[in-house]
Amino acid sequence: MAGLKLRLRLSGLFTVLFAAVYGGASWLSGLRHPPPAPHFAFEAAIPFVPEMAWIYLSLPVALALAPFVLRPREVVPLFFTLTAEVLVAGLNYLIQPFASIWPERASDLGVFRFMDAVNLDYNQIPSLHLAFATTLVLVLSRRFPRMQVVLWLWLIAVGLSTLLTHEHQVVDVVTGAALGAVAAAIVQRRTRLSALVEERTAVTVRGSQAL
């Protein structure tokens, strides 16, 4: 029960933090009329595939499930890593917001319309979608080494989904993946090591008390 409460509290806290930072940055950026996002000429040829919204929305599902498939000592490092990514990206959105380069999208596909409604505007560089997905793959690959191929293929599919739904540009995807990798290497590693030290210290103390 203690582990379940920890997972639920951290999940709720992260959801509130993300909504406040992501939504607040989008609202403030809308008051500034941001310029178009940096992009390459070849991106104009990227087709619009609204069906990729199914893959795009697989990330929120993975984020919601991750705390419940990881060990309790792995949940806190993941929380701090994702939180660091939100704060870094949110600061960047405030300093330099960008507008999408894509023309107005239209689709009767319900899942795409839902995706489009919750994504808001102007939070382009870096893509938090790719930052979160990259971190999850790195963390889950360590927890489930036999699933690494599937996880990395999923990450590639998520990256493609952000482009094929015309939600992000290539620069957004690359910088988002870089943010996720760096955060996992720094924040995730340090908090995970701290958790292991605390756990071993607690075990040692209990052993000494038992003696």
Image (cartoon, rainbow, N blue to C red):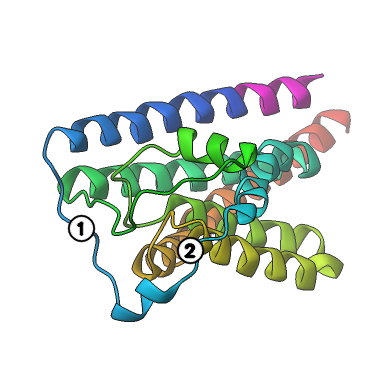
Q: Please tell me whether residue 80 is drawn above or below residue 190 in the rendered image.
A: above
Kindly identify the residue that appears in the image at 69 percent across and 45 percent down: 62
Q: Give the magenta part as a residue range.
A: 1-9
- Residue 40's spot in the image, x, y percent? 30, 77
Q: Which mark is residue 163?
A: 2
- In which image quadrant can residue 24 be found? top left
* First in residue order: circle 1 vs circle 2: 1
Secondary structure of residue under mark 2: helix
Q: Please tell me whether residue 189 is drawn above or below residue 153 in the rendered image.
A: above
In the visual, does 40 lie left or right of 15?
A: left
- Residue 87's spot in the image, x, y percent? 35, 42
In the visual, does 209 lie left or right of 7?
A: right
Kindly identify the residue that appears in the image at 80 percent across and 32 percent down: 206
In the visual, does 128 lie left or right of 28?
A: right
Kindly identify the residue that appears in the image at 14 percent across and 32 percent down: 31
Q: Which mark is residue 36?
A: 1
**Residue at far left of view:** 32
* Residue 185 visible: no
Q: Nearer the viewer, residue 85 or 116?
A: 116
Does the magenta-highlighted stretch encompass residue 3? yes
Kindly identify the residue that appears in the image at 29 percent across and 36 percent down: 26
What's under tag 2, amino acid-wise? Answer: Leu
What's under tag 1, amino acid-wise? Answer: Pro
Q: Please tell me whether residue 16 is drawn above or below residue 105 in the rendered image.
A: above
Q: Main secondary structure of the magenta part?
A: helix
In the visual, does 202 lie left or right of 98?
A: right
Whole-Å distance between the Cαs marked 1 and 2?
16 Å
- In which image quadrant can residue 155 be found? bottom right
Secondary structure of residue under mark 1: loop
Q: Nearer the viewer, residue 28 or 121?
A: 121
Q: Nearer the viewer, residue 4 or 157?
A: 157
Q: Which quadrant: the N terminus? A: top right
